[in-house]
Amino acid sequence: MKAVCWCGKDTVRVETVPEPRLLNPRDAIVRVTATTICGSDLHLYGGYVPGMQPGDIIGHEFMGEVVEVGPGVKNLRPGDRVVVPSVIACGACQYCRQELWSLCDNTNPSAAVLEGFYGYAMAGIFGYSHLFGGYAGSFAQYVRVPFADVGPLKVPDGLSDEQVLFLSDAFPTGFMGADLCDIRPGDIVAVWGCGAVGLFAQKSAYLLGAERVIAIDRFSERLRLAREVVGAETINYEEQSDVVEALKQLTGGRGPDACIDAVGMEADSPGPDDLFDRAQQALRIALDRPHVLREAIQACKKGGVVSVMGVYGGFLDKLPFGAAMNKGLTFRMGQMHAQRYMRRLLDYVERGEVDPSFVVTHRMTLDDAPQAFRMFKEKLDGCVRVVMRP
């Protein structure tokens, strides 16, 4: 079959690889009908995530048709149309029972390695390095889905692939970012980033009762989506000398009730800290450029919530933690718990309250993957999300 393989920093290739097969009674084989490049994939593409090996099949956000199931999978059968969560969970450990699915104890065969980085291991993730299990990813014609009796969600034929594809990762990630804010009526929520996750976080904040949402980015086409589709107020940080001051002015001097970082480890900024962060990252002294997190800490109101859904990988430098402590901020964060949210989000889509396909700007095939990665990374041609069909 065809698959997109990571071959080194900023290099992916379409190669012919063996088709997956059932390895466990709880496995399923899914024929991929739609998959998409996520911002997290760019961290792999740029070489910022340890544990990648040349030839690894990447990709973690996908849906498709079940073609084979193991004897332990009773809830699916060949022909079912499913969307698959990017995080792999067993359904039985203490974390899964608490719906903390991305913290599953039993799905990461590289647990010992990840413990060396983070103290404890998290769940396995499709196509996201050998730190997270070394599972083959979704940029392929077929994918083996472990614990298929727990993860995949059957979807109705009346909805298009593009309407349900983002239930795999981006929509629940954005929704969780807003959910962690404990939004109350009248709240003002600021969201850094107008990529798919940021846009979904903005939409979700409104769904959960926010009165106002303020979106921060620098790309005009993304800011336009935030205004025209989501209904957010917007700040172009390249046109503002001080985003924190701009947010104070927009909130009567108080600051947002909650701040969501939907950017993560490759944040961009026009300030001097950007040069310092980029130099450290280029030399691999640090993995992350945490400008957005610094800004969110400074901007958030006293007693507010900072929700972090952008991916970070290592140790962060020069965080204003004194501001966080003295302002009494609450930090909430994590890899998203897709299985907790997918059914609820599908209901929003079925009722017509949200059409997640608004983030799709480009449609390509797997053969176009190298071009798609360049376009997505460099934000060419107004690219927000590329959907690839094998």
Image (cartoon, helix red, strand yellow):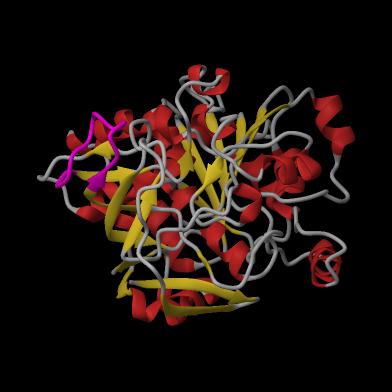
Which residue: 48% across, 41% down? 87
Percent position of residue 18, x then y: 39, 68
Depth check, front residue: 172 or 241: 172
Q: Quadrant of residue 151?
A: top left
Q: Quadrant of the C terminus?
A: bottom left
Look at the image and tell me whether residue 355 can be seen.
no
**Count of numbered badges drawn on the protein:** 0
Which residue: 69% across, 49% down? 312
Q: Quadrant of residue 76?
A: top left
Is 185 part of what is drawn in magenta?
Answer: no
Depth check, front residue: 344 or 98: 98
Q: Which residues lie in the magenta part?
A: 68-80
Percent position of residue 216, x then y: 57, 53
Which residue: 32% across, 34% down? 345
Percent position of residue 232, x then y: 44, 46
The relative height of residue 388 versus residue 355 in the rendered view (above or below) is below
The relative height of residue 62 versus residue 204 in the rendered view (above or below) is below
Depth check, front residue: 251 or 357: 357
Majority secondary structure of the magenta segment? loop
| Residue 324 left/right relative to 192 | right
Is 76 part of what is drawn in magenta?
Answer: yes
